[in-house]
Image (spheres, coloured by chain):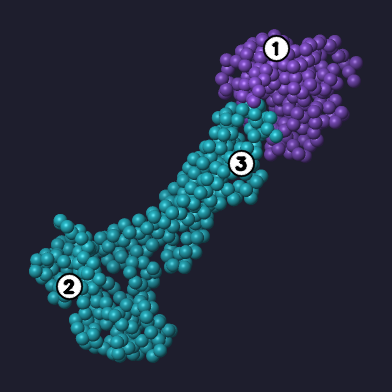
Chain colours: A cyan, B purple
Amino acid sequence: MIWENIKMAFSSLSNAKIRSFLTMLGVIIGVAAVVAITAIGQGVKDSVTKQVSGLGSNVLTITSGQTQKSGKGGGTNFAGALGASTLTSADVTTVAGLKRVTNASSMSLLSGILAHEKSTAADAFIVATTPDFAKIVEQPVAAGRFLSDADSNAKVIVLGDKAKTDLFGTDDAMGKTVTFRGTPLTVIGVIKKKDTGASLGPSQDAIAYLSKGTAKQITGSEPSIMRIYAKVDTANHVDTAVGNIKGALTKNHGGQSDFTVQTQADLLSTFNTILNLLTTFIAAIASISLLVGGIGIMNIMLVSVTERTREIGLRKALGATSATVLSQFLIEAVIISIIGGALGIVGAIGMAALAGKLAGITPVFTLGSILLAVGVSAGVGIIFGIAPAIKAARKRPIQALKAE
Amino acid sequence: MNVIELRNIGKAFTDRAEPTLALENINFTIAQGEFVAIIGPSGSGKSTLMNLLGLLDMPTSGNYLLDGQDVGLVKDNALAALRRDKIGFVFQSFNLLPRLSVLQNVELPMVYSSTRRKNRRERALKLLDLVGLSHRSGYRPNQISGGQTQRVAIARALANDPSLILADEPTGNLDTKSSASIIDELRRLNREQGTTIIIVTHNPEVAEQTDRTITVRDGGILSDTLRQKLTEGTKR
């Protein structure tokens, strides 16, 4: 009986192809949007996870200010995050000397623009750091080398791939000069393209590195430390190292823990929390389309029930029970929405691929999200199909047959 | 054995602007194997009577016994089952579902009685053969003539081997020649299969070809006449 109803539903849908398609459209758009957004969200998440874990699970970041609540009346110290850093060079030295810590390096952001002849690298991030930075976060070079101890006061710079391309195009940059705040700097290395895509923070390819000493000479003062990176000997000792750093830095800062030590796992979980929230929010908005689609199905089904009054009457005269008629119309609604859902998934694959290409993200489709989409669209069919189906089932054969 | 027994049947329509008594005090029986015409002008109540006989509507008073069972006590779903198993309908128009093939239309009552697919198909083909239309089984209703449509409807009416066939103006939309062939078909079924047949019509010529005519007027039975059974030789 169910099988007969399914066959009947298909034949009645294929008899009104355009109408069936338009009816499905709402569901198609809704499912496509929801599935594509979750796939893109998952893609971003995977890429960030890869990038962050690429730093190594044994890399710690220390930032100024407290970004996590602790104790009574805690809160976020925005000043710490935005510039007035309390971290000092002495802190870097302290951290580097701690047990379980193999290397420590600092990162300071410098304002200013890099220029070469008429080209500028407007979006380049100029970072002052120490040679040890490459020991913590690997910096494979395409040409030349990274900063070394000998460069601590030298007028040299290492360019990220994008910064190099902005300034020199396809020309060789090695040994050439770029100007930063009036000071000519010689390019001693170009870092390989990292291709991390859009993700956490600026693209690493847009960074240019120079030594802290050099930066001090150019700007006239010790650059404020945005972040300290520390490498722990093994991943198992991360917690011990975090404890050591907290203890030592609190002592350095006169008993105040006005800084935050974050592991890669912390960073990832903060990021994932934000991303999940965003993905859910956008998917929720997209799912409004599913609701609209459902109403569309209900509307068309109600029209169809009225149009098919005589068919219903005839079927009932031939022995169809109310339940049979109910299931016939319900199955029709569910089939419309399931086909809509399937087309929506196909659409989502297209949309996500396109969006992914534009934004440089590889969308990731999970079986879960696809099953959810199919389930939701079937649910939409049932919820919005039930009212028309009940209307059809309630028709009395005599009324139905009399209708013109 | 009486297929139909009506006792003091009445039907009032109270939901209309003016409450109407469409039928009052109807009493008659129809025995197994009879070939009956119910005749009357429009407004006489014959359509109401046909709806009651077909279990498409319920009387407001009296008792209707179908195969000895009082249908007034039967619930909705069981009524659907009675329509399916005991009654074969042939309507004046919109007889076949346009989206189904001729064969599928004949199968439909058997779909509702959950007959196995294979048996269903076999029986439907046999019935189409019986009305001389097995060569049209794959056609759509809009591809065959009006007379053929009614014959398909007759085949369908026989699907679940019902106690009676109820034909509502079966020739209403047909030309004279097709009308004659439909009545012949019904007559033949009655004679060869012993099927009880009731034709509701306003056409006296159709009624003349049956064995018994019940005339309805103003909601009551005006006359109930038995005709001498037509024999093979005198049949037109």
Do pointers 1 and 2 mark residues of a single chain?
no
Dot 1 amino acid type: Ile
Please, is residue A150 above or below residue A60 in the view? below
**In the shown orientation, is residue A329 left or right of residue B205?**
left
Quadrant of the drawing holding the C terminus of chain A: top right
Name the foreground residue: B77 vs A390: A390
Q: Which residue is depicted at the point 46% across and 45% down?
A: A375
Q: For the residues marked 1 and 2, what is the alpha-carbon distance in whole angstroms?
A: 105 Å
The residue where tag 2 is placed is: A87
Q: Quick one: label 1, few (<14), some, or many (20+) residues within 10 Å?
A: some
Which tag, 3 or 2, sits closer to the chain's start? 2
Q: For the residues marked 3 and 1, what is the alpha-carbon distance in whole angstroms?
A: 40 Å
Q: Quick one: label 2, few (<14), some, or many (20+) residues within 10 Å?
A: many
The residue where tag 3 is placed is: A303
The residue where tag 1 is placed is: B26
Q: Which residue is depicted at the point 24% across and 76% down?
A: A108
